[in-house]
């Protein structure tokens, strides 16, 4: 591949060995038990798989986004749930800290997070929908030397295991839909009085990723826990959401490849009337040709976008294309894998149907693809204009 270098191949191999030796042997059981992959999360941090793109000053490797996507692809082959837990921690909450934090905040919160020693969660989405911030109800006001936060968030990943929550709240009476001014972000530690967690949602997929509501009831945090500029932090963070969407392309790629590989092995081993399914039926070979084509299209889109991101540009439209294409490709390959396995494909112990469940969530979690399609139309012709408006 054009994007491979010796350093990138080394990191990909580290991730691949980790998945083969430590993730795959337990991933199916953890999915069935809906168990948070805490020990795997810590181990990924030890191996440097979490902090690839973060500065060495704060414990990261100072690497690039192409390398990050290679790791994401490998982790998603073994356990999409593990990768989603890491993504919510590093790309979302960690991305906000890296982009907006002071040096003191980064040393205190980002450095242990990069190493996997502490876990982060981003508490932003509300019942109005993750993109409809004009209707968000969470509010924060300054009372002396403390910010007081009230409100609630839903579908927050990593609750119950997170040591620190990055929280969005309205701090101004007026919200500007163009500049996104009017909201601020705050660092809230798990034991902070006034922070309460709801029950874990029983989800279709991503079992064990600990998703649920977070409540703030006169939650007081020191004024130095304001993250980024007052009234104007969410606009800048909207740019870093580009990294999450781009990473979703690699998540979909990993799921699609895992399904392709498993289904191909099965159809070549499954004998009927003296021939393998793959050899006997042209229609089956056509399925694999289509899957392979879609996988390579997604690979090209994802790593091209990552290469652009590594130049310092936020490819807003392309990143959203990565997520929508990642979802579509993962769903295609997962659905075909279940079909090719036949009756065994719907048996949980086979380990195939979980990829279909996990792929389905890519179309909703972190931003529904319908909303992202609209944003693709908006950003494809005015990428730099939007970035300049966000400051």
Image: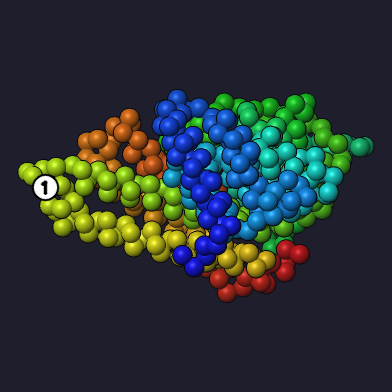
Q: Position of residue 45 (x, y in %)?
A: 63, 39
- The residue closer to the viewer here, 194 or 115, is 115
Horizontally, is 243 left or right of 163 in the view?
Answer: left
Picture quarter containing residue 48?
Answer: top right
Colouring method of the image:
rainbow
Horizontally, is 329 left or right of 242 in the view?
Answer: left
- The residue closer to the viewer here, 5 or 169, is 5
Q: Residue at x 20, y 53 (%)?
A: 284
Outermost residue to the bottom:
381
Q: Is residue 22 above or below residue 247?
A: above
Q: Residue at x 11, y 43 (%)?
A: 272
Picture quarter containing residue 298?
Answer: bottom left
Horizontally, is 219 left or right of 359 in the view?
Answer: right
Q: Position of residue 296 (x, y in %)?
A: 39, 62
Q: Residue at x 76, y 40 (%)?
A: 109
- The residue closer to the viewer here, 377 or 335, is 335
Q: Position of residue 67 (x, y in %)?
A: 57, 56
Q: Identify residue for label 1.
A: 275
């Amino acid at each position: 591949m054009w994007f491979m270098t010796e350093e990138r191949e080394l990191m990909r191999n580290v991730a691949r060995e980790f998945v083969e030796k430590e993730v795959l042997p337990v991933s199916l059981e953890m999915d069935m038990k809906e168990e948070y992959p805490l020990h795997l999360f810590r181990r990924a941090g030890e191996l440097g798989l979490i902090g690839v793109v973060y500065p060495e000053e704060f414990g990261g490797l100072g690497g690039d986004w192409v390398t990050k996507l290679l790791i994401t692809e490998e982790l998603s082959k073994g356990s999409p749930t593990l990768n989603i837990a890491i993504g919510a921690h590093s790309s979302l909450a960690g991305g906000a800290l890296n982009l907006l934090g002071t040096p003191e905040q980064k040393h205190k919160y980002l450095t242990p997070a990069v190493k996997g020693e502490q876990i982060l969660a981003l508490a932003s989405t509300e019942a109005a929908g993750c993109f409809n911030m004009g209707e968000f109800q969470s509010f924060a006001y300054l009372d002396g030397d403390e910010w007081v936060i009230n409100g609630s968030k839903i579908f927050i990943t990593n609750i119950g295991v997170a040591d620190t929550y990055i929280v969005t709240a309205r701090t101004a009476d007026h919200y500007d839909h163009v500049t996104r001014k009017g909201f601020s972000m705050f660092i809230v530690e798990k034991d902070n009085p006034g922070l309460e967690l709801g029950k874990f949602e029983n989800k279709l997929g991503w079992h064990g990723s600990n998703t649920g509501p977070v409540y703030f009831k006169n939650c007081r945090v020191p004024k130095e826990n304001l993250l980024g500029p007052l009234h104007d932090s969410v606009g800048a963070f909207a740019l870093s959401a580009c990294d999450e969407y781009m990473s979703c392309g690699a998540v979909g790629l990993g799921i699609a490849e895992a399904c392709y590989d498993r289904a191909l092995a099965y159809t070549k081993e499954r004998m009927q009337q003296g021939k393998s399914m793959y050899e006997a039926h042209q229609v089956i070979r056509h399925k694999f040709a289509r899957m392979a084509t879609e996988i390579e299209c997604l690979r090209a889109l994802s790593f091209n976008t990552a290469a652009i991101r590594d130049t310092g540009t936020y490819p807003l439209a392309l990143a959203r294309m990565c997520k929508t294409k990642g979802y579509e490709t993962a769903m295609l390959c997962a659905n075909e894998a279940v079909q090719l396995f036949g009756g065994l494909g719907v048996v949980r112990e086979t380990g195939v149907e979980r990829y279909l469940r996990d792929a389905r969530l890519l179309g909703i979690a972190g931003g529904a693809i319908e909303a992202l399609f609209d944003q693709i139309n908006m950003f494809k012709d005015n990428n730099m204009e939007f970035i300049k408006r966000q400051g």
